[in-house]
């Protein structure tokens, strides 16, 4: 690392969930994009940590072990990023396994609804294109429709068929956000709420709910994210100031699955230091700064 400030991107996805690149390729792309500190935060799975760490050591990137947990509060989807958690914490590992199983069931239902209306999707065909143990999501259904030639890309499928108000939208079980926050803390992790005011994704929780999560142990908010407009960033930043929370900014990179570019938003090194101070379940992997 030079005298310049490190470039820190703490929210990315590989094909262990709904990104399009192998974990090691996400890391190599990050290095090429000038990133010094990267977190791979696949949805509800940590299977990418080891291959990502190996690539990170090779290309001189520090890898923050991470995950993005699917949770809910009163039925409203809440994504909780967790950093430096203990990968062997039994209850947390079991929770992620349960969420992945419910996502599998939900994918079958989604495919049934779509195929009943003539859309060319099949559960088995989708699974042929994903690895074992992968966290299944709507993007994998979208990919099947893109392969069929009916849509140009994932985004087109989401706009037409898979958005959260669509008749083809199926919910899946997810834990209470407050329970997930407590569990992440119990596993030594640092819980940060992802894109809290990303209204275009669907309903978002109130400041009161976020306050309750802070009481439960939430450590910070993702302030700078492409799904936040200026008002949302301002609101999230103000909550961080009011409650002394850690502020992050990240890309939410998904390879070619979304237009989000690596390091399009980044985290301030001083804020990252606060994450390092609080996390006790695992250590930085890959290159040691
Ligand atoms: P799920 O968690 O299965 O409900 O699917 C949500 C995921 O879909 C998010 O994590 C995004 O990665 C992805 N997603 C949402 N909207 C879009 C979009 N317009 N284009 C591409 N991917 C999207
Ligand atoms: Fe995603
Ligand atoms: Fe998210
Ligand atoms: Zn994400």
Image (tube, rainbow, N blue to C red):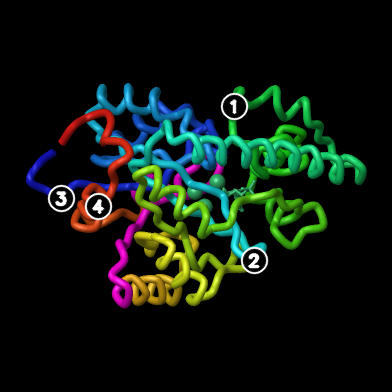
Q: Residue at x 35, y 60 (%)?
A: 219
Which is nearer the N-term, disc 4 or disc 1?
A: 1
CB at disc 2 and ligand 1 closer than 8 Å: no
Picture disc at residue 133 = 1
Residue at point 24%, 58% (across, down) = 271
Location of the C terminus by quadrant is top left
Within-10-Å neighbours for mark 4: few <14, some 14–19, many 20+: some
Residue visible at 41% across and 33% down in the picture: 87
Q: Which mark is drawn over residue 5?
A: 3
Q: CA distance from mark 3 to mark 2?
A: 40 Å
172, above or below 240, in the image: above
Instruction: Provide the residue span drawn in magenta.
Output: 241-263
Q: Nearer the viewer, mark 3 or mark 4?
A: 4
Query: In the rendered image of this protein, does residue 279 appear above or below residue 17?
Result: below
Q: Label 2, on which residue?
A: 74
Assign a secondary structure to mark 4.
helix
Of badges 1 and 3, the one in the foreground is 1
**Residue 225 at least partly seen:** yes
**Looking at the image, is mark 3 or mark 4 earlier in the sequence?**
3
From mark 3 to mark 4, how far is it between C-alphas? 12 Å
Q: How many angstroms separate mark 1 from mark 2 (CA)?
A: 28 Å
Circles 3 and 4, Cβ within 8 Å, touching? The answer is no
Residue 288, image x, y percentages: 18, 32
Assess disc 2: are there few (<14), some (14-19) or many (≥20) residues with their C-alpha within 10 Å of its C-alpha: few
Give the Cα separation between the discs numbered 1 and 3.
Answer: 37 Å
Q: Secondary structure at mark 2?
A: loop
Which residue was labeled with disc 4? 272
Badges 4 and 2: C-beta atoms under 8 Å apart?
no
User: Label 4 to label 2, Cα distance in Å?
Assistant: 31 Å
């Amino acid at each position: 690392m030079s005298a310049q400030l490190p470039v820190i991107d703490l929210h990315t996805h590989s094909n262990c969930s709904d990104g399009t690149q192998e974990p090691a390729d996400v890391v190599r792309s990050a290095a090429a994009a000038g990133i010094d500190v990267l977190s791979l935060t696949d949805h509800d799975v940590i299977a990418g940590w080891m291959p990502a760490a190996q690539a990170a050591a090779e290309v001189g990137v520090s890898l923050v072990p991470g995950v993005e947990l699917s949770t809910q509060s009163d039925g409203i989807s809440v994504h909780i990023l967790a950093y430096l958690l203990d990968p062997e914490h039994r209850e947390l590992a079991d929770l992620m396994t349960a969420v992945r199983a419910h996502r599998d069931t939900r994918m079958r239902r989604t495919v049934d609804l779509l195929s009943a209306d003539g859309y060319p999707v099949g559960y088995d065909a989708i699974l042929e294109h994903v690895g074992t143990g992968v966290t299944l999501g709507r993007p994998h259904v979208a990919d099947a429709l893109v392969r069929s030639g009916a849509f140009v890309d994932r985004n087109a499928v989401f706009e037409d068929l898979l958005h959260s108000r669509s008749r083809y939208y199926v919910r899946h079980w997810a834990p209470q956000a407050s329970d997930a926050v407590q569990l992440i803390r119990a596993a030594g992790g640092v819980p940060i709420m992802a894109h809290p005011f990303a209204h275009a994704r669907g309903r978002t929780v109130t400041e009161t709910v976020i306050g309750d999560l802070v009481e439960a142990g939430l450590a910070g908010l993702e302030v700078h994210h492409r799904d936040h407009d200026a008002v949302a960033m301002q609101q999230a930043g103000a909550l961080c100031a009011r409650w002394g929370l850690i502020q992050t900014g990240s890309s939410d990179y998904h390879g070619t699955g979304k237009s989000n570019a690596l390091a399009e938003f980044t985290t301030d090194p001083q804020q990252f230091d606060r994450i390092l101070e609080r996390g006790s379940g695992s250590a930085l992997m890959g290159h040691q700064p």
